[in-house]
Amino acid sequence: MKKTAVALSFFVIFLLTACSGSGIRGDLDQVLNDTFDAEEEYRAVQDDLEKREKTEQQLFEEIMALTQEEQDQVAKQAQTALDSADERLEFLKTEKESMQSAEENFTDIDKVIKAAEEVAVKADVEALKAKMKERFTAHSEFTKAYEKLIERQKELYEMLKKEETTLQLLQEKAAEVNEQNEQVQLAVTAFNEVTKQVNELKDATMKKIDESEE
């Protein structure tokens, strides 16, 4: 076999932070803190996902450096990569559930909107709500793309286990993996960007609330 490249994904996250306060600010703080806490498991699995991705990349490179005479070793390492991919699916499931819980917690922002008396403050909190909904949607799009990526990678690993698989077929599947990885990276970029916007909007909203309560 000749070595062929396949890129796996890794993404950086921005953390949603909240402040402390009273009144409308305090209520908004509570919603944001509850949402942030609900995302704890989402944040917790990031290192595990990264480690599995790096391990699989290394395994793939080692496999492609082997020869047909070493098929037993190829099959063994390919199975290890498959097991790792399945673990990533479990981590992704945990991440999805964590984000879904956060989204449910964030619905309490409707109470903050209802309680806001100043038109400008109400409008800002509504804008924050809309941006957070956009963020949750962006994460959902990412998970769909990432699940599809893992599916393609597992197909590649299964092909590696079969001695009759040709180099051409491997290269074609690797191209599919790389193409899907590009979609994942686009989804990651979109999610990170909207998360950054959420934090900026949150800061601006808190500042406006502080000014209105002075």
Image (cartoon, rainbow, N blue to C red):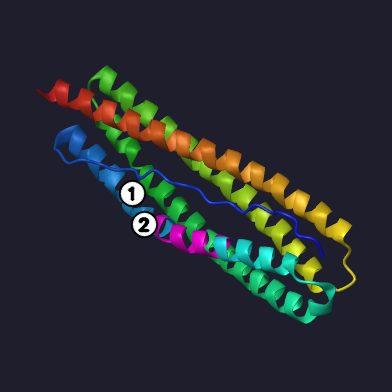
Residue at 36%, 57% in the rendered image:
40
Residue at 68%, 75% in the rendered image:
77
In this view, 45 is above or below 144:
below
Amino acid of disc 2:
Glu
Residue 105 in the image: state x and y as whole percent: 37, 48
| Residue 182 in sight here | yes
In this view, 180 is above or below 112:
below
Give the residues in magenta: 43-53
104 lies left or right of 29: right
Q: Quadrant of the N terminus?
A: bottom right
Residue 74 in the image: state x and y as whole percent: 75, 75
Amino acid of disc 1:
Phe
Question: Is residue 51 part of the magenta span, yes or no?
Answer: yes
Closer-to-camera residue (81/89): 81
Residue 85 in the image: state x and y as whole percent: 62, 66
| Disc on res. 40 | 2
| Disc on res. 36 | 1
CA separation, marks 1 and 2? 7 Å
Farthest residue to the top: give it.
Answer: 119
Q: Residues within 10 Å of mark 2 (few under 14, many from 20)?
A: some
- Label 1: element kind: helix
| Residue 45 placement: quadrant | bottom left
10 lies left or right of 38: right
State how many labels appear: 2
Residue 56 in the image: state x and y as whole percent: 62, 64
In this view, 128 is above or below 75:
above
| Residue 137 in sight here | no
